[in-house]
Image: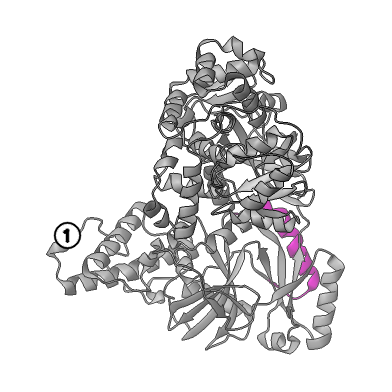
Amino acid sequence: MSLADENVDEENPYLRDPPTEFEPVEELSEEAAREQVEQLREAIREHDRRYYVENDPIVADRTYDALFARLQELEDAFGLTHPDSPTRSVGGEPIDAFETVDHVEPMLSIDQSGEVEDVREFDSRVRREVGEVDYVCEPKFDGVSMEFVYEDGSLERAVTRGDGRAGDDVTRNARTIGSVPQKLHGDYPEFLAVRGEVYMPKDAFQAHNRERIERGEEPFANPRNATAGTIRQLDPSVVAERPLEVFYFDVLEASELEDSHREELERFPDWGLRVTDHIEVVDDIEDAIDYRDRMLEARDDLGYEIDGTVIKVDDRDAREELGRTARHDRYAFAYKFPARAEVTPIVDVAVQIGRTGRVTPVALLEPVDVGGVTVSRASLHNPEEIAEKNVNVGDTVRVQRAGDVIPYVEEVVEKDSEGHYELPDHCPVCDSAIERDGPMAFCTGGLACDAQLRRSIEYYASDDGLDLEGLGEKSVRQLVDAGLLESVADLYELEREELTALEGWGETSAENLLAEIEDAREPPLSDFLSALGIPHVGPTTARELAREFGTFEAFRETAETEPDSLEGVDDVGETVAEQIHEFFASEANAAAVDDVLEHVSPQESELESGGDELEGLTFVFTGSLEGLTRSEAQETVEAHGANATGSVSGNTDYLVVGENPGQTKRDDAEDNDVPIVDEDEFRELLAEEGIDLE
């Protein structure tokens, strides 16, 4: 198909062998700029169609980037932005929420089954009601279905499926997807509403998950979850950075309708709408069944996930006669694939860096069903185990779930690679050297490594640390990415204006977090020792160390100069003592601790037994208490036989609520029927047992 067939001006200088050097913007008149802008838009749309729809680009990527940058430069300089411009694909300002929009036509689900007899029954019903038919067979994409509405060829809106009658208006996000044309090509209808499937290509999904793991973020379970989570982002610039694509597969409504579905699909590429190459028209249901079986064999070779095939009546009049139920159109049927079970290939290996620098290799898998749960990654544990199992990228492996929770590679089922996977020599996050320690491997970057930094801050603020409610994984990542946290000590220099400038932070949440941090400037020694994240020093060991040494200075001096003396403390053996010594011997760790101590004064340990009046009770505290810190209250109840934990469960006896409490713990208490008491009620409860907080 020639460019002329697509109504594109062959004289456009930016179509074939376009220039990539341009005269300075300040030397252009507004009239010349407008003409160049129109030519660039027209050319870039054609290059997009060639790339996404025809898979036949006529310019190099570098040339395309130069044309795109020039268009953006001219639009910015002369105020020539337009909703249809290709530059809208770079995103825009975040929005507060999505508007709910009614669909042009209902987007119903499809009746489906994995049993062949159900497919034959569908065919019998169709032929019984409308006579002989042809079927259009298509892959059943495993993505997110959306409605795209074009008026006079321009993208008017893009809406998620929602409940089938109405969905979220995600137009600004959809404009960032390269295969969504802002303007249709050719001889398009004046009004066109089409149904498409937004998806993340498999290779792009694995690459994106690898990046997330190496940044210390939780990876997506499968491409569909990644797509759904992306398309509903409130910030279009985030969507623009993620690798989404679209296939179009149906007309919902149009000012000019074709007689058959196959004719519609044939017109889509002419309009710039991308369709799959795997479409077949058959006149017998057995051929449709054979098509499904062939697609099942080919699914692993496709660049996108499918979970079956869709069989549709081709003739539009027959479709109308068949009608629909309240839930699905009666002219279509999905013949599902069986779920992949336990055995799957390794696509890639990512390296995860833990809080202590421990390097954990993670296998990225073709998503597989393991015990009813979709798994797309599995632990390879350590280099020694990788060598023992002889595992590498490309091998087909059996995946199991340890304790029905953590997926791991059990064995290689089919060896399709040479040798076994080798860890990189340097950390993928900070480029520091990776060193072996027996069967384990560690990044030597310490707190200079962003992955360790994020996890260290998360742990410092966790229930096992200083229990800074409102500072979880997501918020820590946001603050680190915004440049507000470059060390643990930076927590104490956060300002309200910096927090409220971030997405999702209001005055109340900012003030609550700052109050939590302020309340943690004089923590009990045991809490502080645990919060530092010293290897093998959790809350219990930290409490024993606090009892033994009394002050942080005494503990640190012993750890640095006489580590053997630590072995006399309960829960501390030779290995733990050596780990504590090595922690403080690290210059990066020692400097980080010194920085924190400029803001924090750990309190001398006074945790002595006061009796067993509260034995058997479990307390959780939230918010700021008057006259004492939350940690002091925890130490008090523990000194009298109770347990003080950081999270509410069915075993909790009381949630004590102070000023500016966290909502999560209150919600958990209500869900578990845990009594909620304020500070006065807490003091009265202790007084009844003869315990005075003053």
Residue 358 lies, in percent from the top left, at: 58, 28
The answer to which of 181 and 686 lies nearer the viewer is: 686
> Can you name the residue that lies furthest to the left here?
27
Amino acid on which disc 1 is placed: Glu
Residue 620 lies, in percent from the top left, at: 67, 45
Residue range in magenta is 281-304
Residue 346 visible, this orientation: yes
The crowd level at tag 1 (other Cα within 10 Å; few <14, some 14-19, many 20+) is few
Q: Quadrant of residue 311?
A: bottom right
For this view, does 455 lie left or right of residue 652?
A: left
Looking at the image, which residue is at 41% across and 57% down?
Answer: 500
Q: Quadrant of residue 487?
A: top left
Residue 180 lies, in percent from the top left, at: 48, 68
Q: Is residue 56 above or below residue 248?
A: above
Position of the C terminus by quadrant: top right
Residue under pointer 1: 23
Q: Is residue 616 above or below residue 50?
A: above
Residue 152 lies, in percent from the top left, at: 43, 84
The answer to which of 137 and 165 lies nearer the viewer is: 165
Looking at the image, which residue is at 87% across and 69% down?
Answer: 117
Residue 54 visible, this orientation: no
Looking at the image, which residue is at 49% across and 85% down?
Answer: 191
> Is residue 664 highlighted in magenta?
no
Position of the N terminus by quadrant: bottom left
Q: Is residue 562 above or below residue 15?
A: above
The answer to which of 551 and 154 lies nearer the viewer is: 551
> Is residue 287 highlighted in magenta?
yes
